[in-house]
Image (cartoon, helix red, strand yellow):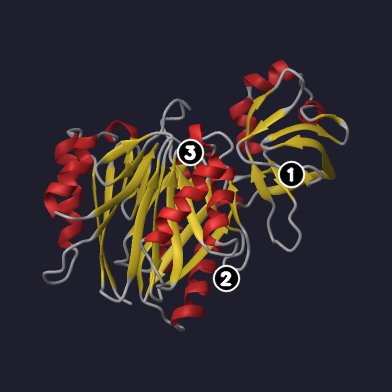
Amino acid sequence: MSIQAGLGISTDKDSLKAVREAALQARQRFDGNASPNVAIVFSSIEFAHLTMLKTISSMFGHIDVLGCSTTAVLCNQGVFRHAVAVLLLNMSPDTYYTTGSITDIKYKTAIKAGEEFGEKLLAGLKSARRDLGIIFSDGLIDKSSNLIYGMQERLGTSFPVVGALAMDNLRYSKTFVYYNQSVESDAACGLILGGGVNFGLGIRHGWKPLGKPRYITRASGNIAYEIDDIPAATVYEDYLDCDIKELRLELRRIGTFYPIGIYLQGEEEYLLRNITDIGEDGSLILQGNIPENSQIRLMIGTKETCFTAAEQAVHEAKEALSVKAGACPKIKFALVFDSISRYMLLGRDAEKEVEAVKRAVGPGVPVIGLYTYGEQGPLKSIDYHGKVYLHNQTISVLLVGE
């Protein structure tokens, strides 16, 4: 299996010039006359229109384009609030891949859409061995955990999928998914790689548990109605010494610093859930599903624990890649999906996470990523026989090598 990868980025205010500049930079990183057959594109929200995708298609002919919008792009050069980044990939003939998309998710329900999405991705691989799925989806899908559940019905519960929920500029208004020559909301797109692709994935968050364990005694989907048989929001009222009105005013800060952590037996870290709203009945509306009878803790994060988690994630990804590709694997590119909560917590220090990835993968390796409203992937970084979850507050590092 062989992949060539080239990365380009532009911060030009003219969207046409920016995408051309980024794509040309990426193409210049290729050896010889190889032509790209896949482009992964991340951009800040102002670039989210058809001109960007049509420009890439006009430059490279038949090419599969995937990606999404974000608040800020991550790459080797740093973190950029106004930018478009293009990762071009040339797949060797022995590398199998297929792409697909799904639209109108809310009308189909997320589970049904996930099943249809999985079927589309599988259809292109036929009998070839499949190794890894990479997906991008609208960050504002209701019950977005269900999209993963639906995909697993078709791809299998232990098939490794890593992905990101698209963002806008923290307005929670409209996010965009890019697929070929289409810019869509309420949609998802993806890529499945096969034929013996070597990869490693590390997912960490660094938030630590607070206080005693508690239990979700009444819940449905992504709504926690009661914790320990009392209205769920009471936990925050007691801990932060404020009422529901005050909680709502500080919801974004509370969701960033004090998410709910779900205990999962056998996993090293808690699965985190952001709070997106508080109901009149004191219920907590969360970004992902929360099972009834779950053991939970309030969690807290700091800059130091974030930095440590970023270093752990990339080193676990390298270790996982080494298991598959040998002691000194050649890393072709790195994808980084970083929660917007981490960006809000780290502020000007956000670039230190990118630096941690760059140090670990070494000079010359393309590093591309984005900030997300949520990350998708299995909790374990080496043993991929675990379930894929929707995460909040994590940094996910995917290394693809040979």
Report crowding for label 1: few under 14, some 14 to 19, many 20 or more residues within 10 A (C-alpha). some
Report crowding for label 2: few under 14, some 14 to 19, many 20 or more residues within 10 A (C-alpha). many
Give the labeled residue for mark 3.
Answer: 347
What amino acid is at disc 2?
A: Ile
Give the labeled residue for mark 1.
Answer: 291
**Residue 61: assigned label:** none
Distance of label 3 from label 2 (alpha carbons): 30 Å
What amino acid is at disc 1?
A: Pro
What amino acid is at disc 3?
A: Gly
Distance of label 3 from label 1 (alpha carbons): 32 Å
Closer to the eye: label 3 or 1: 1
Question: Outermost residue toward the bottom?
Answer: 326
Distance of label 2 from label 1 (alpha carbons): 25 Å
Question: Which image quadrant is residue 87 in?
Answer: bottom left
Instruction: Return the x and y of residue 113 as percentages of the image width and height.
Output: 49, 43
Closer to the eye: label 3 or 2: 2
Question: Residue at 35% across / 37% down in the picture?
Answer: 81
Q: Are marks 3 and 1 in contact (CB under 8 Å)?
A: no
